[in-house]
Image (cartoon, rainbow, N blue to C red):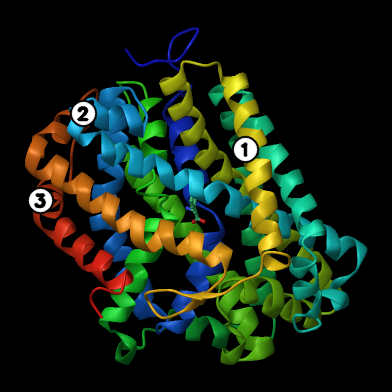
């Protein structure tokens, strides 16, 4: 029985609710800051083409595997893997450990984004465009960033506590369309700026000389992160899908939305940075979002304040809906294991996460330290958690689950689920080859490479 203490298992109200929820999980900071930065770094169009090819092959196979597994077993990751026998339970444990690691640090970044949206209104765009002092003072302050993280955390917990239909579905129905409209609006405005078309050409034109193994690995890592794979989210979300829904088509649509927003985010960021700071302005991760972009926005004059507010509000929405999905995966797992009610589970989790977030927020001040990761980069607490979850655990989990499905249970196991209801499995042959051969080999290489075993 799929345990859901006190009643039947929750379900989405329909096919679109599932697509929207999965897309809302997928569309996050990965689309808004990571994708544009990687595209700019790795030769524009070449990266885009590689990414899209990976999404429709690998991404499709792995997402389908998870969603079908969830629907077939009617359980979240822990229960789903255990249902094949005790000896496979550890895959479920690994899978559900990732959301546990991710929530506290995602909330910290959520808090930063929340703070920046407010700061545009209160301090004005010039104050934020000071080349990084504002940002480092803020995150180094510890206490303040913790307060913003709590605010963010409380919103996420409140929505998850309201449940699948009343909380998650309702929030997505409002936040996602607004996010899309704001992003598209910013793109349209920015493309009217002088020189923007050259920036757009820089983003879209393929520079084939930049094609390399490193590019493929970067695109693969981005695909995992962006599609919210290998952390059990799609297993939980798949377990709420009714049997008559065509999973095959739904997954096409989710991929389409996620990739579409990533491409759009590139249009929003790359040409603007190109116009105001040239190609050196495309710093990575947090520095792009919190240091370079505020400079770019400030250079737009008054419009920059409006663009800044819209951008950071879009980022809040994207971060919120992703964080909701991670917390839902944890909540669903806990409810199944401990047979507790949703509200009680969320309450206990919120106490644990408040404590964990405090430690991470203080990781930039009181507990500051730096270590060197096996892949050579210097890291502090937040980077270490990011590294463990994205670079080590995710490839390992995908390796284990593709071996389990491809070789132990056999690909047909998933095919049956995909062909259920009105479903037609259009990429069956591709799926079979990927799940049995390509994915295990590539995941193994990725795992060895990011752990530093394979230099
Ligand atoms: N897919 C999200 C993004 O692109 C990231 C994410 C990570 C979502 C972890 C949920 C959990 O930003």
Quarter assignment of residue 196: bottom right
Looking at the image, is 344 positioned above or below residue 5?
below
Q: The C terminus is located in which quarter?
A: bottom left
Q: Please, which residue is most extreme toward the right here?
A: 122
- Residue at point 69%, 87% (across, down): 276
**Marks 1 and 3 in Cβ contact (< 8 Å):** no
- Please state the horizontal and vertical placement of residue 315, each as a whole percent of the image: 65, 57
Cα–Cα span, label 1 and label 3: 39 Å
Left or right: 302 as drawn, with respect to 366: right
The local secondary structure at tag 2 comes to helix
Left or right: 90 as drawn, with respect to 264: left
Looking at the image, is 213 positioned above or below residue 308?
below
Q: Is residue 418 visible?
A: yes
**Number of numbered discs:** 3
- Please state the horizontal and vertical placement of residue 118, each as a whole percent of the image: 83, 57
- Residue at point 29%, 58% (across, down): 395
- Residue at point 40%, 32% (across, down): 236
Q: Nearer the viewer, mark 3 or mark 2?
A: 2
Quarter assignment of residue 452: bottom left
**Marks 2 and 1 in Cβ contact (< 8 Å):** no
- Whether label 2 lies within 8 Å of ligand 1 gets the answer no
Residue placed under numbered mark 1 in the picture? 352
Q: Which mark is residue 35?
A: none
Q: Residues within 10 Å of mark 2 (few under 14, many from 20)?
A: few
Looking at the image, is 64 positioned above or below residue 423?
below
Residue placed under numbered mark 3 in the picture? 436
Residue placed under numbered mark 2 in the picture? 86
- Whether label 1 lies within 8 Å of ligand 1 gets the answer no
Q: The N terminus is located in which quarter?
A: top left
The local secondary structure at tag 1 comes to helix
| Residue closer to the observer: 438 or 151 | 151
Lower position in the chain sequence, tag 2 or tag 1: 2
């Amino acid at each position: 029985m799929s345990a859901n203490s006190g009643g039947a298992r929750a379900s989405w109200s329909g096919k679109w609710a599932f697509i929207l929820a999965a897309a809302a999980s997928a569309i996050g900071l990965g689309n808004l800051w990571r994708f544009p930065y990687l595209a700019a770094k790795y030769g524009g169009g070449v990266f885009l083409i590689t990414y899209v090819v990976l999404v429709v092959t690998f991404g499709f196979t792995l997402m389908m595997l998870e969603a079908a597994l969830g629907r077939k077993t009617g359980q979240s990751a822990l229960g789903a893997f255990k249902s094949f026998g005790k000896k496979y339970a550890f895959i479920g444990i690994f899978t559900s450990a990732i959301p546990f690691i991710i929530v506290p640090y995602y909330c910290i970044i959520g808090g930063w984004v929340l703070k920046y949206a407010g700061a545009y209104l209160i301090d004005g765009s010039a104050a934020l465009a000071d080349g990084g002092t504002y940002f480092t003072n803020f995150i180094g302050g510890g206490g303040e960033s913790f307060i913003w993280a709590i605010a963010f955390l409380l919103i996420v917990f409140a929505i998850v506590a309201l449940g699948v239909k009343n909380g998650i579905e309702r929030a997505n129905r409002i936040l996602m369309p607004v996010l899309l409209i704001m992003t598209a609006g910013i793109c349209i405005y920015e493309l009217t700026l002088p020189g923007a078309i050259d920036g757009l050409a820089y983003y879209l034109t393929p520079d084939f000389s930049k094609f390399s193994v490193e590019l493929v690995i970067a695109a693969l890592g981005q695909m995992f992160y962006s599609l919210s794979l290998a952390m059990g989210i799609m297993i939980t979300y798949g377990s709420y899908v009714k049997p008559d829904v065509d999973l095959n088509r739904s997954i096409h649509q989710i991929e389409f939305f996620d990739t579409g927003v990533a491409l759009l985010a590139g249009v929003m960021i790359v040409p603007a940075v190109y116009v105001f700071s040239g190609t050196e302005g495309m710093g990575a991760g947090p520095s792009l979002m919190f240091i370079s972009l505020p400079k770019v926005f400030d250079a737009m004059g008054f419009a920059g304040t409006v663009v800044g507010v819209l951008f950071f509000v879009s980022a809040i929405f994207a971060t919120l809906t992703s964080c909701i999905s991670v917390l839902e995966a944890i909540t669903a797992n806990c409810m199944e294991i401990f047979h507790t009610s949703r509200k009680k589970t969320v309450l206990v989790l919120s106490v644990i996460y408040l404590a964990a977030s405090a430690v991470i927020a203080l990781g930039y001040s009181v507990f500051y330290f730096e270590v060197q990761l096996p892949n050579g980069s210097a890291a502090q607490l937040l980077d270490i958690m990011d590294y463990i979850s994205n670079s080590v655990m995710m490839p390992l989990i995908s390796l284990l689950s593709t071996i389990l499905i491809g070789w132990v249970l056999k690909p047909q196991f998933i095919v049956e689920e995909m062909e259920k209801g009105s479903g037609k499995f259009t990429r069956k042959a591709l799926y079979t080859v990927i799940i049995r051969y390509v994915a295990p080999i590539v995941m193994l290489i990725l795992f060895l490479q990011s752990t530093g075993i394979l230099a």
